[in-house]
Amino acid sequence: MSWVVLHARAIKRTCWMIVAVLSMLTVIAVVDRYQTQRVTLLEGQQALLSQRSAWGYSNLLSNLQTHKLQHSLLMANPPPQGCLPDEYIAGQQRTTQTLSADLEGLSQYTLRVPVHQLAPLPKPQAPRMSLKEGGVRMTSRQFLGYTCDRRYAVIQETQTRLQPQPLLPPMVLGPAITEGLVVHVAVSHGQEPALYFDIRFTAGKAEFVPATGDTWLTSQPQQVQGEDRFFHHYSNLHQGLQMRVYSDPLTPDFLPQFLKLNGFWLFLAGGILVCLLMINWLLTHLIDASVVQHQAATHDFLTGLYNRRAGMTLTEVELSRATRKPGSLSILMLDIDHFKRVNDTYGHDGGDQVLKFFAQLLTQTVRQEDVVARLGGEEFLIVLPNTELTGAQQMANRLIQALRSSTLDYAGNRVGVTCSIGVSAWHGPGDSVQTLLIRADLLLYQAKQQGRNRYVSEIPPDCAVAARA
């Protein structure tokens, strides 16, 4: 405990530094995780859009090939000349129904269209694309002939469908990789008008949403190839099919997604930091309380000097140090003169002020390494490490002179304070603290008997009794 009290400030500073470093490391880890996940998300979105756009374009090419193949088959097996009998029409219907059943995404019909509706029909060689039922439908119609009653035209219609590709289960970042993604697509074939639509990723699935050409052109950025957008232009000159794709900014605001992905771990890290702050706060208060408790246990509450118990302990410590070196040690036993008269004249508050004044003068006069303690009442002890008897006598004389030249102002009165001092020195191994204090106390009593306001010292080996007025 004494070590904690002695280094209390350094311990508290170290604790706060540890908390600050841990907090900084936590912030750095969170920022690094944010950047890593954001880059991972961008790369995942780029890869996803690249794969899906390439898949969509290749399926559109395949559907276009299917339409051309059906036209080639019809050209290879032309209908009979003249009118088309009902048996031929029924056979064609069975054939197209069979083909539609065998090929996924292909629908083929043999239709009878009233002659007056034939003019608005598109030309057979140009498949038209449209957005129907959440998918891209490509439709082509081939004219076969007329029924024998000339009331109907027989048309063979071929339809292919491109539905949104199902999303694979996300592995790393969960649904965040597709959340809020919007992709703009423009598909054109030959001289046909372009088809504009958006692909929106919501609720774990992709859906095709109609768009207009004006909106698509005005919203297309000048430079979209980069870190936060996806852009690609697919073109097949032989088939005459082109597809342009660009996305809205990828992860424009990743923070909400980051909080959703890492909410538990961020809450856990924040809780740990709060706990560390609370523990550190409690620890600093505990250290402060220990310092206050140690101060109360070792110091006199009135004067702030060491109390009797601490003074005796420190005297033992200095005596042990002098024994080990070996070295010298002296003590001064002090007693304020006529202290009872001060209490009777000025009251106990006046006596307390005299004690504080006396303690302050002692502290200002002695050296930094000297120990000053209040033993009780008006009796004080000064321990002088590494000091011979002659040096102790000089210190005692300095204290008496300092008191003679100083007065205490209390309640409009100038109060003079004097003291009597007993000076004793350690005689070497075998001389204990107890005997040292007894000798100093006897010398203090002699100083009182000789008239006070003086010191009485032991007799040096080569000198007579030293008494100074």
Image (cartoon, rainbow, N blue to C red):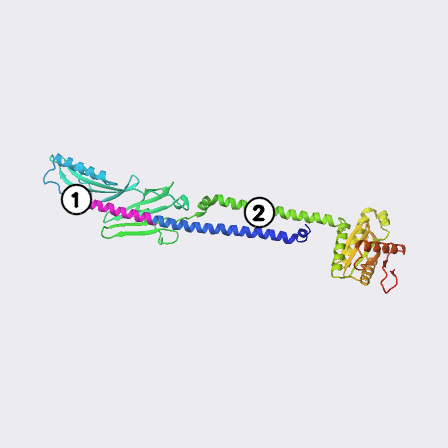
- Tell which of 163 and 445 is nearer to you: 445
Q: Is residue 72 left or right of residue 211?
A: left
Q: In the image as oriented, which residue stretches furthest toward the right?
A: 450
Q: CA distance from mark 1 to mark 2?
A: 79 Å
Q: In the image as oriented, which residue stretches furthest toward the bottom?
A: 462
Question: Residue 464, percent across and down?
Answer: 88, 63
- Tell which of 225 and 77 is nearer to you: 77
Reply yes or no: does residue 438 show up in magenta. Answer: no
- Residue 305 visible in this rendered orientation of the protein: no
Q: Which mark is residue 73?
A: 1
Reply yes or no: does residue 60 show up in magenta. Answer: yes
Q: Which mark is residue 276?
A: 2
- Residue 135 visible in this rendered orientation of the protein: yes
Question: Residue 167, percent across and down?
Answer: 35, 43
Magenta segment main secondary structure? helix
- Tell which of 262 and 78 is nearer to you: 262
Q: Mark 1 near mark 2, Cβ–Cβ under 8 Å?
A: no
Question: Residue 227, percent across and down?
Answer: 39, 53
Q: What range of the chain is rendered magenta?
A: 50-73
> Disc 1 residue type?
Leu
**Which numbered disc, 1 or 2, marks the residue that appears first in the sequence?**
1
Quadrant in which residue 153 is drawn: top left
Mark 1 secondary-structure assignment: helix
Q: Closer to us: mark 1 or mark 2?
A: 2
